[in-house]
Amino acid sequence: MVQDRSFGRRGDSSETQRAAEKPKQISTNSSAPGAWKKAPQKSPARQINQVPLSRTPPSAFGSEATDEDLFRLYVGPNAIKFMRFYRALAEKENVISFNWFVFLTPMSWLFYRKLYGPGIFVMSFPIISVMIFPKLADMSFTVVVVVMAFLANSYYVRTATRCIDKLRALDLPPGELEERIRRAGGTSIIGAIFATVIYASLIALKIMI
C-alpha cells in the first residue's frame, strides 16, 4: 500500500509540472492568438548610418552673398585694391591705372593671378617677335608690357566677373557656389615661381646672345 501511494504522488507531481509548462508553451508560440511579440530593435550603428549626410559646404557669409562678397572671394588677397575697378565696371565707367608689378614682372603677376592665357602669350611673345621682327623685338616687347601694365587691373576684374557669372548660371547651392568661386580665383604661388624662373631665363638668354 505504501508503494501505491508513492506512485500516485509521483503521478500527481508529473501532471502538475506538465500543467505548469503548458502556459509557457502558449506564451512563446508566435502563431497563438493574443501572444506577446517583441518588436525588433535596430542597433544604434544602423540608425546612424541611415541618417543622410550633406556634402554641400556651408555658406561662408551665413546668408545670401552679395556681388561684392563673391568678387572678394574670387580675388582673395588684396581684394580691396580691386574694389575701385569693380565698382567702376558695375557703373560702366572706364578706370585706367598703371600696375608696376605687371611692368616689372609681367609673367609672374599673370601666373600669380591665374591668368594663364595672357601669361603664356607674354612668355612666347619674345620668341615670336625675334623670329618675325628681329630688329624690333625689344621695342615691341616693351610696348606690349607697357600696354598690359595699364590694362591689367581692368582686365582682371572683367575676367573675375565673367567667371562668377558663369558659375552662378549653374544654380548651385550657396556653399558649393562659394567653394567653386574660391577655387577658380585666388592666387598661385607655384605659378608665380614658375613664371619668374622662365622670365629670368629669357633675360639671361637675351644677355648672352
Image (cartoon, rainbow, N blue to C red):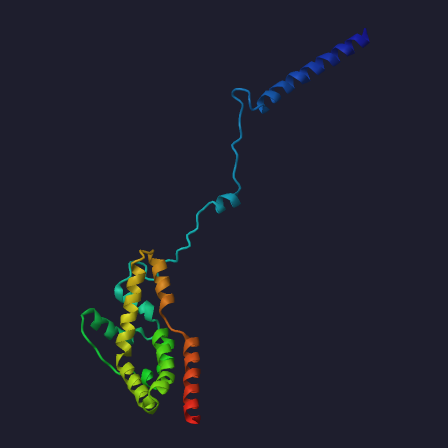
Point 32% across, 57% down: residue: 170
Dividing the image into 4 quarters, which one contains the N terminus?
Answer: top right
Q: Nearer the viewer, residue 100 or 63?
A: 100
Point 75% across, 14% down: residue: 10
Quadrant of the rendered structure where residue 113 is? bottom left
Q: Nearer the viewer, residue 139 or 192?
A: 139
**Left or right, residue 39 beside residue 177:** right
Quadrant of the rendered structure where residue 199 is? bottom left
Q: Which of 79 and 116 is in front in this view?
A: 116
105 versus 90 height, above or below: below
Coordinates of residue 164 in the picture (x, y in percent): 30, 64
164 versus 46 height, above or below: below
Coordinates of residue 68 in the picture (x, y in percent): 26, 67
Coordinates of residue 44 in the picture (x, y in percent): 52, 44
Point 33% across, 83% down: residue: 101
Point 43% across, 83% down: residue: 198
Question: From this viewpoint, which residue is outermost toward the front?
Answer: 132
Quadrant of the rendered structure where residue 163 is? bottom left
Numbered-mark total: 0
Coordinates of residue 20 in the picture (x, y in percent): 64, 18
Question: From this viewpoint, which residue is outermost toward the bottom?
Answer: 208
Dividing the image into 4 quarters, which one contains the C terminus?
Answer: bottom left
